Amino acid sequence: MKKKLLLLSTGGTIASVASNDGLKPGESGESLLKMLGAFPFDVTVKDILEMDSSNIQPEEWEYIAKKIDKYRNDFDGIVVSHGTDTMAYTASMLTFMLQNINIPVVLTGSQVPMNVPLSDAPDNMKLAFTAAANCQPGIYLAFNRQVMRGCRCVKVRTTSFDAFESVNFPPIAKVTSDGFQVLHSQPAVTGQCHLNTQINTNVSLVKLFPGFDPSLLHAMANNGCQGIVIEAYGLGGMTFIRRNLVAAVGKLIRNGIPVIAASQCLYERSDLTKYEVGQQALLEGAISAHDMTSEAAITKLMWGLGQGMGIAAISKFFNTDVAGEVTLN
Ligand SMILES: NC(=O)C[C@H](N)C(=O)O
């Protein structure tokens, strides 16, 4: 029997057409599907959004998550076509909102519109449907012959076809000369899937640079920010002379605002224990993001705060692997 798959179309370059204002979404999911030709799956299409993903925000995450939840028991797998610019954020947030998802949900898109000859769109779309039909339950991102765990993805190139990388975790599946190969398994499902879209969006993601004024962190807190991810240096080091970021972090934490220390290095983990510049931050209560992407860290923080977690609970949450987003030693 053919697998029953659902395409939820949200826009992005894959569905874009030329206009006087530049490329913008205009192609329906049905027309995307038609351009792929014959297909060994039974595909239903629903157009749910028509947006460039630079416009996708928490309201759309909730909307997309609710659509997936509505249909997840009626299909063997779901493909979400989506713009590439914020696809890694959406994939990460869906991972938290739809924990223990019972089917494969695969996000995909393209660097070139489907209606342009030699676009990467047909290959990406076919890969996404193949993953939705064959992978274990989970949230994935399929691009350029690789199927990646959604919460490990980062967009690393603006124009090339290999736009995404799976950071600090190998791809789950690949297309090789032997066809579609599943290489890694997903974390075991630990219970029923319950949609939970409660998030707190009063957060901030800050990249540290030499000369960063720590009072900016207080300005954020004074403007309602309730949690911060800092992309610190290397293993998670933070400045503590002259412009004392460490002291500012401590003050925020004592005021109940969790501060997560991630690394501005794309690869490998943060570890605050190794250097003085990390240990000082640790003493003030900074929480390590370990080897999580910034996309996963900020969405995990939004979701955790949305559940009403305080500092201690957020710290525990960031030391828990929820759905394969982090490697803990
Ligand atoms: N390649 C793309 O999809 C980029 C587009 N601006 C988007 O994210 O919607």
Image (cartoon, rainbow, N blue to C red):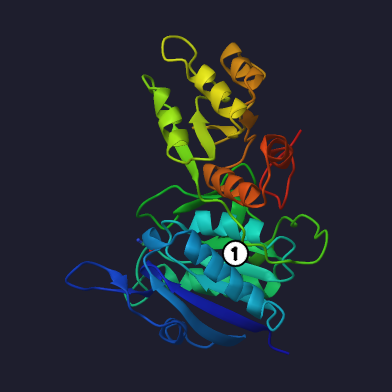
Q: Is residue 329 visible?
A: yes
Point out the residue furthest to the left here: 20
Asked if residue 203 is positioned above or below residue 93 in the image, the reply reads above
Asked if residue 212 is positioned above or below residue 159 in the image, the reply reads above
Q: Is residue 170 visible?
A: no
Q: Nearer the viewer, residue 126 or 208?
A: 208
Q: Residue 329: image x %, image y %?
A: 76, 33
User: Where on the picture, by quarter, is residue 12?
Assistant: bottom left
User: Where on the picture, by quarter, is residue 115?
Assistant: bottom left
Query: What secondary structure is marked by label 1?
Result: loop
Count the marks: how many?
Answer: 1
Q: Residue 317: image x %, image y %?
A: 71, 42
How many neighbours does mark 1 have within 10 angstroms: few (below 14), some (14-19), or many (20 or more)?
A: few
Q: Is residue 36 left or right of residue 150?
A: left
Q: Residue 22: image x %, image y %?
A: 22, 66
Q: Nearer the viewer, residue 121 or 149?
A: 149
Q: Is residue 214 left or right of residue 195?
A: left
Q: Nearer the viewer, residue 51 or 75?
A: 51
The residue at the point 27 percent across, 68 percent down is: 23
Which residue is under mark 1? Answer: 177
Point out the residue furthest to the top here: 241
The residue at the point 59 percent across, 81 percent down is: 6
The residue at the point 64 percent across, 24 percent down is: 285
Q: Amino acid at mark 1?
A: Ser
Q: Quadrant of ligand 1?
A: bottom left
For label 1, being within 8 Å of ligand 1 is answered no
The residue at the point 38 percent across, 61 percent down is: 55
Q: Is residue 114 left or right of residue 80?
A: left
Q: In the rendered view of the protein, which quadrant contains the N terminus?
A: bottom right
Q: Residue 154: image x %, image y %?
A: 50, 49
